Amino acid sequence: MSDPIFALDPRQAAIARELYAGVRDLPLISPHGHVDPGLLADDQPFPDPARLIIVPDHYVTRMLLSQGIPPARLGVPRRDGGPVETDGRVIWRLLADNWHLFRGTPSRFWLERTFATVFGVETRLTSATADDVYDAIAAKLAEPGFRPRALFEKFGIEVLATTESPIDDLGKHAKLAADGWGGPGGRVITTFRPDHVVDMDHEAWAENVGKLADLTGEDTGTYAGYLASLRRRREAFIEAGATSSDHGHLTARTANLSEAEAAALFEKGLRGEADAADAETFRAHMLLEFARMSLDDGLVMQLHPGAVRDHNKQLFAAHGRDVGGDIPQATDYVQALRPLLDAYGMDPRLRVVVYTLDEYTASRELAPLAGGYPALFLGAPWWFLDAPDTMRRFREAVTETAGFYNTAGFVDDTRAFCSIPVRHDVARRVDAAFLASLVAQDRLPLDEAAETLADLAYHLPKRIFRLDKKA
């Protein structure tokens, strides 16, 4: 394949290729993502190409929805059990007929590189070639070497973190541990994501809080029992290999309430009397509570703010969450994070990795914050910002103030298992190109650029997410 990311002047391109060659074969560290752990626990053959590549990919389905093609025609399940297309070939042909919609998008870039590097299929997707591409991928999926665990080995993944709710029984992770794949020191670990038991705006919040009690035996009808239950679940997650928690709040706001204030707010929520402002305040306070828990148990905190969830209400009503109905919003970090940083920003026991969907805050707010507090690190561009061009802009925006070592390296944050090696490869190429520009300008020696690239690709995420100590 060509190297479009290295399309620089000849000298820089040569330096970039040399740098990239030094990290190309490093193992993959995937410390945050949304791959279903059952995929690897059960190790069953993948379904047809459409159900593997199209149906779960909301990057793809949302683009087609924007052009009037409903997700049900792409095989996305309906909440009401209504009719959904089940023929994988029909779904695949529909994508091929509308492939022009993805011109210039990262979705096309990821998919084409996945077709080529994972499945060895370099035929350009068109209406005329749809069946040929489908058949070629389907033939690969039928081979033993393309089952999930075999691909895990082929991809060179050293550690893969999945993401589960505290009310998940972690049964799939128990199976992985029994097979020698999971648990502390394992190759597949979990991440503690408590949003659905923290967010009072969630339609099932009170019910989920009750489920915590069922799992832990604590009385979650009281605030003290609720906190005790969360600590118990964190212990269970750590036993399943977790080294981090993840928090996907609407904003980055933090608040440090008194115990009495927090308890009153919690009880108000259980009575069904909390409004949107109460829910926001409770979420903000719980980030301080989780920081306190992290001081004790060592879980790295990840903050993923700024997504207005289920903005498309009709899509949510028909298909539920996580199908492409979320939209980024402007996000404040300077004042929002201040209570957390005032309390614990200088504490070496705390490690907080902050991501953004608001690109304009990278240089103005996040880089200076990460450059000023030992507890704070910058997460990689994610979701709407995980395109090659944005990754390059991220490096240009934050390096002046935060340097390279106040960032957490690359995090793929994907649901699409087969895209993992492609995403890591592209990130390594982007960083190689950026470092090559510094070398060409005599701003960085070649040997230091090579060391930096290896750190960004492998050593930093392993260290920041405490994966080097998890055994």
Image (cartoon, rainbow, N blue to C red):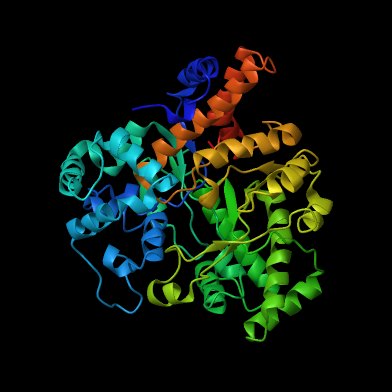
Location of residue 118 with respect to 196 vertically, above or below: above
Q: Toward the viewer: 173 or 148?
A: 148
**Image spot of residue 82 (x, y percent):** 28, 78
Query: Could you tell me if residue 143 is visible in this image?
Result: yes
Q: Is residue 103 left or right of residue 297?
A: left
Query: Could you tell me if residue 468 is visible in this image?
Result: no
**Image spot of residue 432 (x, y percent):** 54, 25
Location of residue 466 with respect to 50 vertically, above or below: above
Q: Is residue 416 left or right of residue 5?
A: left
Residue at the spot 79% in from the left edge and 47% down from the top edge? 345
Q: How many marks?
A: 0
**Image spot of residue 158 (x, y percent):** 44, 33
Q: Is residue 293 left or right of residue 118?
A: right
Residue at the spot 73% in from the left edge and 57% down from the top edge? 332
Quadrant assignment for the N terminus = top left
Residue at the spot 53% in from the left edge and 62% down from the top edge? 166
Location of residue 313 with respect to 140 vertically, above or below: below
Corner quadrant of residue 460: top right
Corner quadrant of residue 200: bottom right
**Image spot of residue 281 (x, y percent):** 73, 71
Q: Toward the viewer: 33 or 225?
A: 33
